[in-house]
Image (cartoon, grey):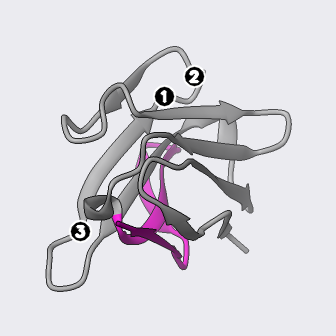
C-alpha cells in the first residue's frame, strides 16, 4: 500500500522557518522524482519544488528560490522541504507528490497535506 505522510507544518511568524517531511512507503522511492506542491485558499495548486530520484537535480518555483530547499534521504525514504524567510503569502496546505516509473508505467501518488500558516 502506497503512503506519503507529511509532517512539520504549523504556525510561524513572518521571517521564521519550518521544515516539512514526507515519509514514503509502498513504492520504489529512490526511482521516484519527489515534489512539493502547495495550495492556498481560493487558489490553484502550484508546484513549489522538485528533486530527482538520485537527489542530483532540483528545481524551484521563482517565488521560493533562495528561501526553500528540497532534499531527500533515500535510506529513510523521506523527502524534506526546508523553508526559510517565510512570508504570509507562503500560507497554504503543502502536499508531497511522487512520480514513479515502473515497468514503463507512470504513477503519481499524493500525500494528505500539511498546513503551513505564516502570520504577519
Check contact, mark 1 vs mark 3: CB within 8 A. Answer: no
**Label of residue 45 in the image:** 3
Q: Is residue 46 above or below residue 2?
A: above
Residue in front for this viewpoint, 119 or 95:
119
Where does label 1 land, which residue? Answer: 52
Task: Specify the quadrant that holds the N terminus.
Answer: bottom right
CA–CA distance in space, label 2 to label 1: 5 Å
Question: Does the segment drawn in magenta span residue 98?
Answer: yes
Q: Which residues are magenta?
A: 91-120
Q: Position of residue 66 (x, y in %)?
A: 36, 25
Q: Residue lying furthest left in this view?
A: 43
Q: Residue lying furthest bottom in this view?
A: 42
Question: Does the segment drawn in magenta span residue 5?
Answer: no
Q: Position of residue 49 (x, y in %)?
A: 37, 41
Helix, strand or loop: magenta stretch: strand
Where does label 2 land, which residue? Answer: 55
Task: Tell me the quarter of the picture where residue 82 sits.
Answer: top right
In screen coordinates, is 111 left or right of 45?
Answer: right
Element on which disc 1 rests: loop
CA–CA distance in space, label 1 to label 3: 20 Å
Mark 3 or 2: in front is 3
In screen coordinates, is 8 left or right of 99?
Answer: right
Check contact, mark 2 vs mark 1: CB within 8 A. Answer: yes
Q: Residues within 10 Å of mark 3 (few under 14, many from 20)?
A: some
Of pointers 1 and 3, the one earlier in the residue sequence: 3
Q: Residue lying furthest front in this view?
A: 120
Check contact, mark 3 vs mark 2: CB within 8 A. Answer: no
Amino acid at each position: 500500500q502506497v503512503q506519503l505522510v507529511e509532517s512539520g507544518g504549523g504556525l510561524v511568524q513572518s521571517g521564521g522557518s519550518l521544515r516539512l517531511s514526507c515519509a514514503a512507503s509502498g513504492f520504489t522511492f529512490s526511482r521516484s522524482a519527489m515534489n512539493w506542491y502547495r495550495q492556498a485558499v481560493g487558489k490553484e495548486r502550484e508546484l513549489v519544488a522538485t528533486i530527482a530520484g538520485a537527489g542530483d537535480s532540483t528545481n524551484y518555483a521563482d517565488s521560493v528560490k533562495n528561501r526553500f530547499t528540497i532534499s531527500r534521504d533515500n535510506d529513510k525514504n523521506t523527502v524534506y522541504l526546508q523553508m526559510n524567510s517565510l512570508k504570509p503569502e507562503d500560507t497554504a496546505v503543502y502536499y508531497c507528490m511522487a512520480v514513479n516509473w515502473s515497468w514503463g508505467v507512470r504513477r503519481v501518488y499524493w500525500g494528505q497535506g500539511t498546513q503551513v500558516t505564516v502570520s504577519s
